[in-house]
Image: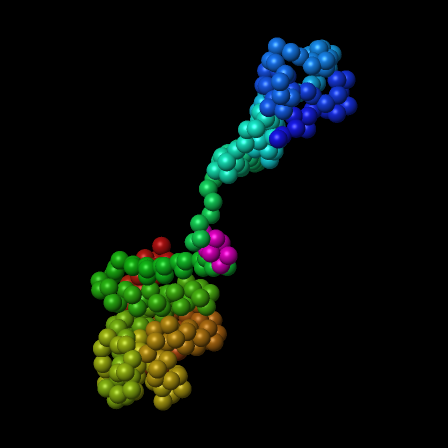
């Protein structure tokens, strides 16, 4: 039989709580009528008024309910220990009480979590991708600028104009005066009509880009320079830029070349059998150079 005084304060003014006559005890001595009250009855009744802490069944249940809110882990125990005399809970009821206490604790635990905004938990893929080293982005290569097209002038076609432009650009890289550019273009007009010639005498020259084939000894290229006289290798002389640098380098070595007539300056470099023919191309060469440098 449960002792009701276990939940009471043993140091209370009235001492251990005594069961009231509201629940008749089965321990009363036989032969005692219900109307008769023991001598301690009045003291027990008065002790409830003198000691406000005496446990009552209603107060015990209220305390258990309050404990369920404040003390999450002891909710089930408080309810079980506060039942009336002779009342017990089945194992299923005790398990249900424990589950409710755990659920209540879990819900309160969520309320105590940080209030920082949650943007979502990272997935397995995002975690894996974040762990991998990020590859450095390589700068995109700029597209090569398209070659500048110069509209042909002075009766030239596009191939001739393109060759004249290569002569002028090579002279600009050498930082030569404009007069040297005009002499070079006029010389190429006389020697090759501004076409890149290969030689029928040198089959090797035909292995490189060319626009025509000539038969003047071993002369090749825009300036009809001969490899046999020391102008350079065939593979180099077939390149307009290289052939131009060879011509201008020789022109710059002639004393006072800038003050010489165009025919004399060009013939001093080329040593042609028809040296007087260069002068006829001077006006056209000036027009071409002006169009390229514009």
Look at the image and tell me in which quarter the N terminus lies.
top right
- Left or right: residue 132 compared with residue 212: right
Q: Residue at x 29, y 87 (%)?
A: 204
Q: Residue at x 59, y 15 (%)?
A: 22
**Rendered location of residue 257, percent (x, y):** 44, 71
- Is residue 119 depicted above or below 35 in this figure? below
**Rendered location of residue 144, percent (x, y):** 36, 61
**Rendered location of residue 45, percent (x, y):** 69, 12
- Left or right: residue 195 compared with residue 16: left
Q: Residue at x 36, y 68 (%)?
A: 167
Look at the image and tell me in which quarter the C terminus lies.
bottom left
Span of residues in magenta: 126-132
Q: Residue at x 65, y 25 (%)?
A: 4
- Left or right: residue 60 compared with residue 42: left
- Left or right: residue 268 compared with residue 49: left
Mainly helix, strand or loop, the magenta region? helix
- Is residue 274 depicted above or below 148 in this figure? below
């Amino acid at each position: 039989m449960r002792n009701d005084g276990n939940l009471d304060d043993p140091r209370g003014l009235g001492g251990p709580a005594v069961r009231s006559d509201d629940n008749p005890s089965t321990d009363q001595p036989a032969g005692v009528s219900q109307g008769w009250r023991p001598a301690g009855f009045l003291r027990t009744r008065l002790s409830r008024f003198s000691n406000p802490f005496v446990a009552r069944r209603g107060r015990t249940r209220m305390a258990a309910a309050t404990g369920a809110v404040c003390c999450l882990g002891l909710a089930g125990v408080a309810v079980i220990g506060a039942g009336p005399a002779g009342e017990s809970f089945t194992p299923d009821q005790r398990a249900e009480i424990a589950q409710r206490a755990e659920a209540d604790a879990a819900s309160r635990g969520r309320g105590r979590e940080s209030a920082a905004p949650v943007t979502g938990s990272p997935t397995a893929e995002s975690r894996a991708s974040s762990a991998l080293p990020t590859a450095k982005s390589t700068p995109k290569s700029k597209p090569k600028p398209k070659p500048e097209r110069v509209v042909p002038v002075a009766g030239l076609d596009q191939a001739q104009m393109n060759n004249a432009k290569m002569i002028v650009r090579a002279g600009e890289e050498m930082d030569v005066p404009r007069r040297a550019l005009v002499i070079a273009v006029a010389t190429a007009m006389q020697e090759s009509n501004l076409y890149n010639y290969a030689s029928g005498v040198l089959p090797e020259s035909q292995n490189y880009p060319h626009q025509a084939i000539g038969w003047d000894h071993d002369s090749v290229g825009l300036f009809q320079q001969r490899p046999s006289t020391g102008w350079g290798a065939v593979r180099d002389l077939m390149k307009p830029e290289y052939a131009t640098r060879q011509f201008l380098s020789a022109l710059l070595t002639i004393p006072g070349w800038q003050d010489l007539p165009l025919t004399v300056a060009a013939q001093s470099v080329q040593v042609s059998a028809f040296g007087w023919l260069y002068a006829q191309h001077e006006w056209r060469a000036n027009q071409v150079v002006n169009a390229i440098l514009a």
